[in-house]
Image (cartoon, rainbow, N blue to C red):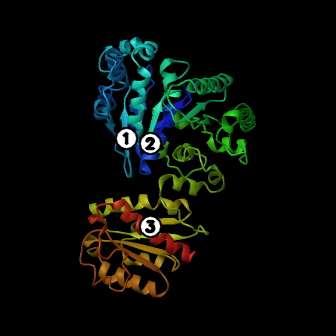
Amino acid sequence: MGQIVTFYSYKGGVGRSMSLANVAVLLAGWGHKVLVVDFDLEAPGLENFFARSIDPDLAKENSGVVDLLSDAMATGIWPGIEGWLPNTIEIKLPGSRGHLRLLTAGDRSGSEYFRRVQQLDFREFYAVKQGGVLLEGFRDELKAEFDFVLVDSRTGLTDIGGFCTVQLPDLIVLLFTPTKQALAGGIDIVSRAAKARQRLPFERPVVPVLPVPSRLDVSAEFRLGQQWLDTFARDLADIFADWLPRTMNLRTMLELLKLPHIPFFSYGESLPVLEQGTVDPTGLGYAYETLAALVAHDVEGVETLTSDRTKYVHESSGIFYPSIERTDAEVFVRYSYSGPDESLFREFWSHLSPLMSAGVSVIEANTLTPRAEWVNMIPSSAIVVLLVSADYLALKDAIKAELPALVAAAERGLRIFPVIVRKCLWEPPLAKFQVVNPKSPIASEKDRDSAWTAVVKKIAQAVGERY
């Protein structure tokens, strides 16, 4: 069964929707099946974060949450998964191993939307038309269909916000800025939700709350930032006690969870995990990656997060974690400039991320020089990966100069891994090398992700042996 995660903030302007969108992109990129749901009915717009993949204006014309709730309140019938799943919008992400879909707040193409929002009566729905039972069925459908459902909840104290924090979630991500109102209000709401959950006619385990301090400018105002983190640690102790091991330092956890204030990303709807990446420890992308890993782990195993964050992140995605003690390893990748080989290289590059996160330098050998001289530019301790196709073998001087130079370098200790990416007559020119996949070109594999993972495992093993 999947996990439903509600992103909630007592006040607006804390970066709640932005956090949800970036975590969704990471979870989908790691291979999970993810749905994002816009329950912020009075201020919708989650689709704008995905403008690079979908047309936000067209997305606003899709039926969504308001349409489903209005019809259910009018008829007392829930349409079932066949009634809402077709209205979700696929969001295609470059290099993603999983799937991401969006269920919008509802059809906003005309003037009816906000009238329908104002007419939603949850109290009557629950009391008269068994709304709790109907929405519990919706919850079951969500969990059966997706690995992760990320819900963007309305701020403040509202009926729809109550549904998102009481009946719906398996985990609540509570975002707040360094203000007393945002912190105290958020704590009050999740405390009320915990008490209300005990009165539900449905079985519910304890729903952990993951507090996330947002928009902290600890670099410019270091002392003030530290004072606020001390305040957070004191006021949130009871909330953390539900899931944080006693051996863990709460203050350390808050340092890991805080979202830094980056002015550049304060304008418009941004996805720093794609625009900035997740490597810079001071960046927003890095912070979102930590948050996504905690969500993926259901806030378990946090000891590993503090001792080996890279391992914790890669365990979140199901990607193997290479055991590499040194961080000066170098891997050079060579391929042809043809379109098909270029796209296969990009796939390979994505799968090399565990190595790069572990400190291995991965270098695109094509950028050095198109001639065979590049072989003499690299140390014999390095590892070379050749992405072989007919186009690679047809490169100028490939057979006459480059491959003989690689043979000579191999005799001096250079490790060379030829990978057949497209079917070709490779055997004569590569006879002196041990080809990684002699019988199954990558492009011919039905499951290319598994094929690339097997290749990277062999490279990681060689890196571990050499370094």
Which residue corresponds to mark 1? 145
Which residue corresponds to mark 2? 2
Which residue type carries mark 3? Val
Crowding near the residue tagged with mark 2, few <14, some 14–19, many ≥20 C-alpha atoms within 10 Å: some
423, above or below 92, in the image: below
Q: Position of residue 231 (x, y in %)?
A: 74, 32
Q: In this view, does 363 lie to the left or right of 243?
A: left
Residue drawn at (60%, 54%), measured in percent from left and top?
Answer: 309
Q: Which of 387 and 75 is in front in this view?
A: 75
Is the residue under label 1 in contact with that under label 2 (CB below 8 Å)?
A: yes
Instruction: Tell me where residue 117 sits by quadrant.
Output: top left
Which residue type carries mark 2? Gly
Q: In this view, does 16 lie to the left or right of 450?
A: right
Q: What element carries label 3?
A: helix
Q: Is residue 201 left or right of residue 421?
A: right
Which residue corresponds to mark 3? 456
